[in-house]
Image: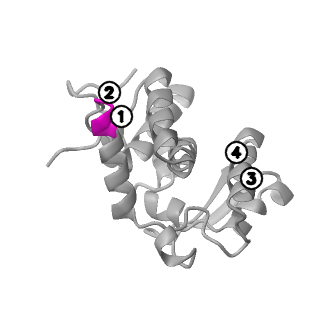
Amino acid sequence: MNRVKSIYNDDDIQRVTKALDNKHPKYGLLFTLGIYTGLRISDLLNLRVGVVRACRASNFELNIIQRKTRQPVTILLTETILERIERHIMFWRLEATDYLFYSTETNRAAALSRQHVWRVFRAVAAQNDMAGIGTHTMRRTFAVKHYRAYRNIKKLQERLGHRFISSTLNYLMQADGTIIS
């Protein structure tokens, strides 16, 4: 089984984001939101426009219940991220009840599927010679960025919702078996 990789530097993050934007801007936005929030793909795809728009009224806090763990999580979004989301909402004329990342095949009645997004990410990665990129790359990259910024493994474990520290350490492991610096 091939594991997805973390992205360790900002140039590569920009390269992946641009390639996904070129495929369709919603994939670039999804990737950006994923590496900024660390949310699982299932949580990102479940976001509705009204929930995201409510962030401005609640001090830029995104409050959701995680699908996998059923635990509440609050994430502070920046003005820049919210502006990019708002441009997406306005361009596609999305309503409050619409999924932020909706499936065009269901006339906005359903979110994109994890499998569909995974296939898009893998195809874009292959076209751009970027091996090991998948939907979980967003979460792993978030972990690397968070750890580099705060150097607090326990805080990262809590933020990711991991029960075991070993799961969190796995996110920070490089190919040679060492923890990122």
Q: Residue at x 45, y 36 (%)?
A: 19
Estimate the spatial distance between the alpha carbons at disc 3 and disc 4, rounded to whole Å.
5 Å
N-term-proximal mark, 3 vs 1: 3
Q: Residue at x 57, y 47 (%)?
A: 29
**Residue linked to disc 1:** 172
Q: Amino acid at mark 3?
A: Glu
N-term-proximal mark, 1 vs 2: 1
Q: Amino acid at mark 2?
A: Ile
Q: Nearer the viewer, residue 72 or 137?
A: 137
Estimate the spatial distance between the alpha carbons at disc 4 and disc 1, rounded to whole Å.
28 Å
Marks 1/2 in contact by CB < 8 Å: the verdict is yes
In the displayed image of the protein, which residue is found farthest to the right?
Answer: 57
Marks 4/1 in contact by CB < 8 Å: the verdict is no
Quarter in which the C terminus is drawn: top left
Q: Residue at x 51, y 54 (%)?
A: 39
**Residue linked to disc 4:** 84
Estimate the spatial distance between the alpha carbons at disc 4 and disc 2, rounded to whole Å.
33 Å
Q: Residues within 10 Å of mark 4 (few under 14, many from 20)?
A: few
Estimate the spatial distance between the alpha carbons at disc 1 and disc 2, rounded to whole Å.
5 Å
Query: Looking at the rendered structure, which numbered label has been put on residue 86?
Result: 3
Q: Quadrant of residue 173?
A: top left
Query: Looking at the rendered structure, which numbered label has been put on residue 179?
Result: 2
Query: Which mark is nearer the camera, 4 or 2?
Result: 4
SS at mark 3 in the image: helix
Tell me: residue 165, above or below residue 93.
above
